Image (spheres, helix red, strand yellow):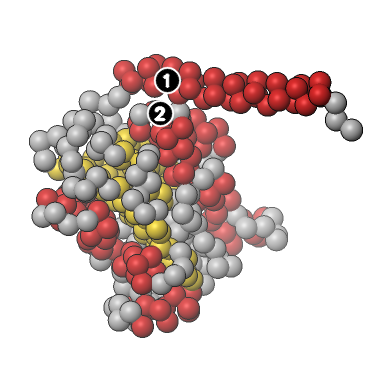
């Protein structure tokens, strides 16, 4: 039988625990916010620009001088075209979903990026595409994985979100749904590009050499070399109604096998949007982004600890991800249009609209 004093003691314990919890949350959040504020980047947009738009075209080994001037111009031109397409959609009063989809489709249609047309090859010489999109207002999301025939996976991800009761569809079933939705399907050959094919051949050769030295292993280079996994594309938007949206699309990693799916179609890993916190699109070594739930973690820091987006992104990418041994980057936008960009790789293709409404395109770390 419980005595009065034990009930009192339990009540006391409950109140004390609740107090400790509240005290632990608030001051940490406020102190963190105060301490972090001065680190805000100069390129952040003004407090309420009403609309905001950013894109990325993948993070990885992109050193100054490693691209020919012509290649660099091509990347910059395509990034500018994509960021302007999204921004113009927002200026015309269209939704964040429209802006994100428009920009990502442009990058999916270009052979420059590892998404859509330029997707990397799997171990057996196929292309398997993943994508996802999320709307911050409703927290609805759509994701697709392992596609072989859908020209624009981001459009299928949006259809999953808007036209089905589900969040994620994969493989043949997803493609059946794409056909029902009358989305454009292409012959698998459409995704063949010489440079991606050559990358696969290089990796296979390396893998063969390694396997001869150490039978029964999948070589580290094939699994993890940063040059085998860049070019994923993504976008985040704040539309005129104050809604945040995020989307991401990829071909995954060169030489992936066994039906491997990365972080891109995993909501909370490669993509996340919530009007209470922020919108995130990620790129990098997917396995780490899944285990760290990178996109959701960044938004949780913004929501629960009131961290500015840049600081939240740096904490997850430059500290947590770095310490774990992963690499990659994110673009982040909050409900006021503040922008954050963070990556621990050598470069990240990226573009955003600055406070004067002009596109800014960047590739390298500085
Ligand atoms: N995150 C993608 C994946 O692991 C690859 C990338 O972003 O480059 O599938």
The image quadrant where one finds the C terminus is: top left
Residue 35 to residue 170: above or below: above
User: Could you say where residue 238 lies in the image, as x and y percent from the top left?
Assistant: 24, 46
Left or right of residue 309: residue 52:
left
Front residue of this view, candidates 81 and 32: 32
Of labels 2 and 1, earlier in sequence is: 1
Residue at disc 2, secondary structure: loop
**Number of the label disc, if any, that sits on residue 154:** none
User: Could you say where residue 111 lies in the image, as x and y percent from the top left?
Assistant: 28, 63
**Number of the label disc, if any, that sits on residue 30:** 1
Badge count? 2
User: Could you say where residue 222 lies in the image, as x and y percent from the top left?
Assistant: 53, 56
The image quadrant where one finds the N terminus is: top right
The answer to whether one can see residue 10 in this image is yes
Please name the residue shown 18% across and 30% down the image.
Answer: 46
The 10 Å Cα crowd at callout 2, few under 14, some 14 to 19, many 20 or more, is many
The answer to whether one can see residue 281 in this image is no
Left or right of residue 1: residue 96:
left
Please name the residue shown 18% across and 41% down the image.
Answer: 50
Q: Do residues under tags 2 and 1 come within 8 Å of each other at their CB atoms?
A: yes
**Number of the label disc, if any, that sits on residue 306:** 2
Q: Residue furthest right?
A: 1
Front residue of this view, candidates 32 and 183: 32
Residue 9 to residue 168: above or below: above
Q: Estimate the spatial distance between the alpha carbons at disc 2 and disc 1, rounded to whole Å.
A: 7 Å
Residue 322 to residue 256: above or below: above
The 10 Å Cα crowd at callout 1, few under 14, some 14 to 19, many 20 or more, is some
User: Could you say where residue 57 lies in the image, as x and y percent from the top left?
Assistant: 30, 51
Residue 199, image quadrant: bottom left
Residue at disc 1, secondary structure: helix
């Amino acid at each position: 039988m419980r005595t009065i004093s034990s009930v009192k003691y339990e009540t006391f314990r409950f109140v004390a625990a609740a107090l400790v919890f509240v005290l632990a949350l608030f001051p940490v959040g406020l102190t963190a916010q105060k301490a972090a504020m001065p680190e805000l980047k100069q390129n952040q947009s003004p407090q309420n620009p009403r609309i905001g738009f950013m894109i990325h075209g993948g993070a990885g080994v992109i050193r100054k001088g490693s691209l020919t001037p012509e290649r660099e111009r091509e990347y910059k031109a395509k990034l500018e075209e994509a960021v302007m397409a999204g921004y113009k959609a927002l200026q015309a009063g269209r939704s964040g979903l429209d802006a994100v989809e428009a920009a990502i489709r442009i990058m999916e249609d270009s052979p420059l990026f590892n998404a859509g047309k330029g997707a990397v090859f799997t171990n057996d010489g196929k292309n398997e595409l993943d994508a996802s999109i999320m709307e911050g207002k409703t927290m609805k999301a759509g994701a697709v994985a392992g596609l072989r025939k859908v020209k624009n996976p981001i459009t299928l991800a949006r259809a999953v979100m808007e036209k089905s009761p589900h969040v994620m569809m994969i493989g043949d079933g997803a493609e059946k749904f794409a056909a029902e939705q009358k989305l454009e399907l292409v012959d698998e050959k459409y995704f063949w590009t010489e440079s991606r094919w050559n990358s696969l051949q290089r990796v296979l050769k390396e893998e063969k050499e390694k396997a001869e030295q150490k039978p029964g292993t999948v070589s580290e280079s094939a699994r993890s070399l940063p040059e085998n996994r860049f070019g994923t594309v993504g976008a985040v938007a704040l539309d005129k109604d104050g809604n945040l949206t995020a989307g991401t699309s990829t071909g995954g990693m060169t030489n992936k096998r066994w039906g491997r799916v990365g972080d891109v179609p995993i909501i909370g890993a490669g993509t996340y949007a919530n009007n209470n916190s922020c919108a995130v699109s990620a790129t990098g070594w997917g396995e780490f982004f899944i285990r760290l739930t990178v996109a959701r973690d960044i938004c949780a820091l913004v929501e629960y600890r009131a961290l500015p987006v840049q600081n939240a992104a740096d904490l997850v990418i430059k500290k947590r991800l770095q310490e774990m041994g992963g690499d990659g980057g994110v673009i982040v936008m909050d409900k006021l249009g503040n922008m954050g960009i963070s990556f621990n790789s050598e470069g990240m293709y990226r573009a955003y609209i600055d406070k004067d409404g002009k596109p800014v395109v960047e590739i390298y770390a500085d």
